[in-house]
Image (tube, helix red, strand yellow):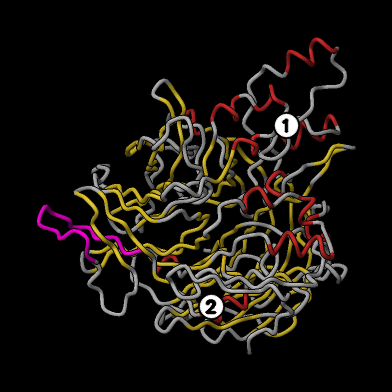
Amino acid sequence: MPPVKLETSDDARSVDNGKAKECITLALKGLETIEPLVRSVEETPEPISTEVQGTIPSWINGKLLRNGPGKFEFGNTHYNHWFDGMAMLHQFKIAKGQVTYMSRFLNSDAYKNNSEKDRIVMSEFGTLAMPDPCKNFFQRFLSRFEMMTPTDNASVSFVKYKGDYFVSTETNFMYRVNPENLETLEKVDWNKFIVVNGATAHPHYDSDGTTYNMGNSYGSKGAQYNIIRVPPEKTDAKDTLQGANILCSIVPANKSHPSYYHSFAMSENYVVFIEQPIKMDLLKIVTCKLRGKALSDGIYWDPKQDTVFHLVDKQSGEVSSVKYHTKAISTFHQINAFEEDGFLMLDMCCSDDGQAINNYLIQNLRKSGDALDEVYNTMGRVFPRRFVLPLHLTGESPTDQNLNTRPSSAATCVQISKDKVFCQHEDLHGDDLLEYGGLEFPQINYVRCNTRSYRYFYGCGFRHLVGDSLLKMDLKDKTFKVWYQKGFFPSEPAFVPSPDAVEEDDGVILSVVLSPTQDKGAFLLVLDAKSFEELARAYVPVKMAYGFHGTFHASA
């Protein structure tokens, strides 16, 4: 597909900061409103048929499971931030070339309590619940001094532990769910197994089923980052996180202002924690209820600080004394990490700005006209980048010279002192990606390529506040293929390998595509992963909200 022609404003310009065209952003005009994609929708608790156009390969047999917000108000109270909406679980069941669709709200305590009271009673990331109006003034005043209860609104992703599916957010609560009918089964508290105050919704998996994750703890020692390991086997059918342990703990650069992180990276032998300058002011967070502010008020971007990569040995739990620094960048999602020739390649979607998390207010997503253009044009773009980390430094390693000896790699890594290396990234794209607004929601052929050298990754182009195209990136020559249709907004792609796959990209890409202008215009898109040609779409006759993450569950 040829590049999309953009309508750009006169002030579209490039900024050259020493890496050619690294920070170019194109200012766009006339963005269409996506307000209908961030509106409350009804659940579809029984499977319904879809209308298939084209041909879905008969070998696809399983369920695309998706998670994201689906309800943004209760009574006359409403949420402020996109991340706050009540979790809605989606299932696209694919078999014999046909697709059925169903969705259910997660039956969390937050959802049940809010529904029962017909108002928001559980605070979320960007919304502070107001005191019960039925209480007297003194009771309402005292309630401001109570600690905020962590939400169990697990709206971010589907994850797997010990073969079971859970839905997760970033607090200490998850829910085990039944992938067959999306039934909410069991609330699980990380705190019952290990001492952490939360865990990410983006764990990593070894081939034997061992699961790694990260979570913070706040105690007498101050804040700590913890690497978590969960064994693959159950000792009992009812097991959830039994056997989980903390592999190691890392002390923040500033214990009262630890970094926020959404995910982490993993290679064959290392977990890589990215300590970025998106910071959490713990005093502000602890006192947010007293101050009448949402939790998000305690999160800020400090561009004066470096981003630091911490390496942890997956077997021993030993934290490398060498710290790998780079300039201030933010990252929400990693692409892959692998070791080769004594280096660790760390591929991530990065931005030079870290304020995006505070821009995804519902009022911003629902804007139109010039106000919407302004929100988009003041946000930093996200691009795929590679950092090359030398693994075997010794006292003999030369300082003040580039240690990256890999041919055709533009990344640099310079040893500043015994335990400090400064890294500069290599772009994993050409200038033509700028036309598509960068790339987020990266995915790979995970089973085949995770922690290994790879060639392809997939993601959404972002010429809007949500994804508006699908991209297939080729690392061999930094070219890409595109699926784009004006007025349609695809979700995070899911790669499904074909059963007789030989090459890395033998399979299909699945994505849920929404339209703000077509009533009930949502469909499941099926692309040939190799050619990126459209194979089929399955139209869903209900309204859907734009979601976050998901996974493909293959049927036995």
Q: In this view, does 418 lie above or below 299?
A: below
- Mark 2 is surrounded, within 10 Å at the Cα level, by few (under 14), some (14 to 19) or many (20 or more) other residues, namely many
- Numbered badge on residue 472: 2
- Residue 310, image x, y percentages: 33, 48
Q: What residue type is disc 2 on?
A: Lys
The magenta segment: 387-401
Tell which of 282 and 69 is nearer to you: 282
Tell which of 215 and 383 is nearer to you: 383
- Residue 425, image x, y percentages: 39, 66
Tell which of 158 and 61 is nearer to you: 158
Q: Which residue lies furthest to the bottom in this view?
A: 2
- Mark 1 is surrounded, within 10 Å at the Cα level, by few (under 14), some (14 to 19) or many (20 or more) other residues, namely many
> Would you say residue 400 sits in the magenta stretch?
yes
Q: In this view, does 147 lie above or below 99?
A: above
**Residue 253 in which image quadrant:** top left
Q: Disc 1 designates what residue?
A: 122
* For marks 2 and 1 on the same chain, the one whose residue lies earlier in the sequence: 1
Residue in the picture at 63% in, 21% down:
147
Regarding residue 502, the answer to whether it shows in the image is: no
Horizontally, residue 1 falls left or right of residue 190, namely right
